[in-house]
Image (spheres, helix red, strand yellow):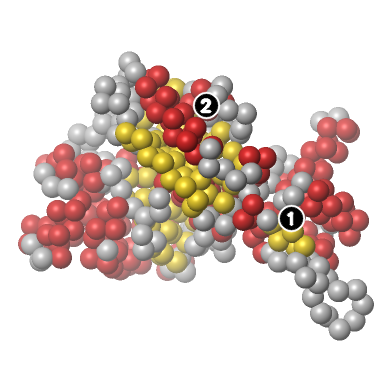
């Protein structure tokens, strides 16, 4: 970097660092910001003044401290900042307008055309555009809309905004961000659904206090995400976290997987695999378990063994401080699956890893709301190229 570029970059880093801290810990005073960031009082003042001018921050009533000048708490004007979240599913597109308090304001759902396949990419994009157009009419302040986030079930290159592979949507190397940015003068962000959940939960959710964690989504497909030092690890090819393709079933139970291999976790534990290979839906499976059906209970034990085996190896290798579980499989099986998972994992991992906290979200979050959270995460993101200067 030349000196001018380096100076601009450092200025951006400092501002984002301050902004993210105010969002995560506000109300917070300028003095506390200087203490926590190590920046000078003048630098903090300059940054805060810029953010106040952009109507991103709000000054609360000064605090009584008994001596000297009263500290003025700063907060992000979360109720006046907005994001659009789009869930692109196989059969529908759901969009939600959300403010930065994670409060949904409006929701729109459109059904995908029944002839949507690999030869009808335009139909899919038009369906997404239709949802976005309806939501844009409901944004209270367009200048405070900070972007569009998209949740995709499949492999996503979030850096280039490309859907690498989505078998359900028949997309391979599809430039979705580019297509949407042709329509809108707004930032567009794409992310795999499991990575998306991890990003949002690490920003201001159940993983906010964690530095190293793994997210596991047991759903109609199976996904995972790995966060290390508060940064998402997407891997060399943007496909890290594909927990569903760990080999956990063998012999006659090693069913063919769409990835080309056999015995993948997703073939018999995911909702789609369960329907295809075992013949019942998640709803039916959950009902049978609660009714004490012996066949369902036997299979539940096999699922617990398979998932705990994969996760025990992962925890031993990565040594996370938290593991977060979610997904429709757990929504329907609840503690019938979660309790044996916890027990088996803690039995299997070495004593040195047993401080890990195993958490479960009681209800799987709406993917369109999570996609709006992606916009918030990017809005408050701190550049990571030269972390040594932060």
Provide the residue designation for mark 2. 180
Q: Is residue 23 left or right of residue 121?
A: right
- Give the SS element for disc 1: strand
Image location of residue 275, percent across then percent down = 16, 43
- Tell me the residue at 28%/44% (across/down): 220
- Tell me the residue at 53%/55% (across/down): 102
Q: Nearer the viewer, residue 176 or 259?
A: 176
Residue 212 falls in image quadrant? bottom right
How would you rate the neighbour count of disc 2 (Cα within 10 Å): few for under 14, some for 14-19, many for 20 or more? many
Provide the residue designation for mark 1. 57
Q: Earlier in the sequence, mark 2 or mark 1?
A: 1
Above or below, 380 relative to 263? below
Image location of residue 52, percent across then percent down = 79, 52
- Tell me the residue at 38%/25% (across/down): 124
- Is residue 191 visible to the viewer in this orientation of the structure? no
Image location of residue 100, percent across then percent down = 59, 53
Quote the CA–CA distance across marks 2 and 1.
Answer: 29 Å
Image location of residue 65, percent across then percent down = 83, 80
The quarter of the picture where the N terminus appears is: top right
């Amino acid at each position: 970097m030349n000196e001018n570029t380096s100076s601009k970059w450092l200025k951006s880093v400092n501002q984002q660092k301050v902004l993210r801290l105010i969002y995560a810990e506000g109300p917070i005073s300028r003095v506390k910001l200087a203490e926590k960031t190590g920046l000078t009082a003048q630098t903090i003042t300059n940054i805060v003044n810029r953010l106040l001018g952009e109507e991103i921050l709000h000054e609360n009533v000064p605090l009584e401290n008994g001596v000297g000048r009263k500290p003025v708490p700063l907060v992000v004007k979360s109720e006046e900042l907005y994001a659009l979240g789009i869930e692109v599913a196989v059969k529908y597109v759901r969009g939600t307008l959300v403010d930065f308090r994670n409060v949904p304001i409006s929701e729109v759902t459109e059904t995908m055309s029944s002839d949507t396949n690999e030869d009808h990419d335009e139909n899919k994009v038009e369906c997404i555009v239709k949802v976005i157009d309806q939501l844009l009419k409901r944004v209270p302040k367009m200048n405070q809309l900070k972007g569009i986030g998209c949740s995709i079930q499949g492999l996503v290159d979030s850096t280039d905004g490309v859907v690498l592979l989505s078998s359900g949507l028949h997309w391979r190397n599809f430039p979705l961000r580019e297509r949407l940015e042709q329509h809108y003068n707004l930032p567009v962000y794409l992310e795999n659904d499991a990575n998306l959940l991890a990003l949002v939960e690490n920003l201001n959710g159940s993983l906010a206090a964690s530095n190293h964690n793994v997210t596991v989504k047991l759903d109609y497909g199976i996904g995972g995400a790995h966060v290390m030092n508060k940064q998402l690890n997407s891997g060399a090819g943007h496909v890290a976290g594909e927990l569903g393709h760990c080999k956990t079933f063998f012999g006659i139970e090693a069913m063919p997987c769409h990835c080309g291999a056999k015995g993948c976790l997703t073939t018999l534990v995911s909702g789609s695999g369960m329907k295809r290979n075992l013949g019942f839906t998640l709803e039916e499976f959950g009902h049978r378990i609660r009714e004490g059906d012996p066949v369902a209970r036997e299979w539940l034990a096999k699922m617990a063994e398979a998932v705990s085996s994969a996760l025990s190896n992962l925890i031993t290798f990565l040594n996370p401080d938290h593991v977060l579980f979610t997904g429709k499989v757990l929504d329907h099986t609840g503690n019938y699956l979660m309790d044996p998972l916890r027990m088996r994992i803690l039995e299997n991992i070495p004593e040195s890893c047993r401080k890990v906290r195993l958490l479960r979200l009681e209800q799987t979050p709406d993917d369109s709301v999570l996609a709006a959270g992606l916009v918030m995460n990017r809005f408050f993101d701190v550049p990571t190229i030269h972390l040594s200067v932060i």
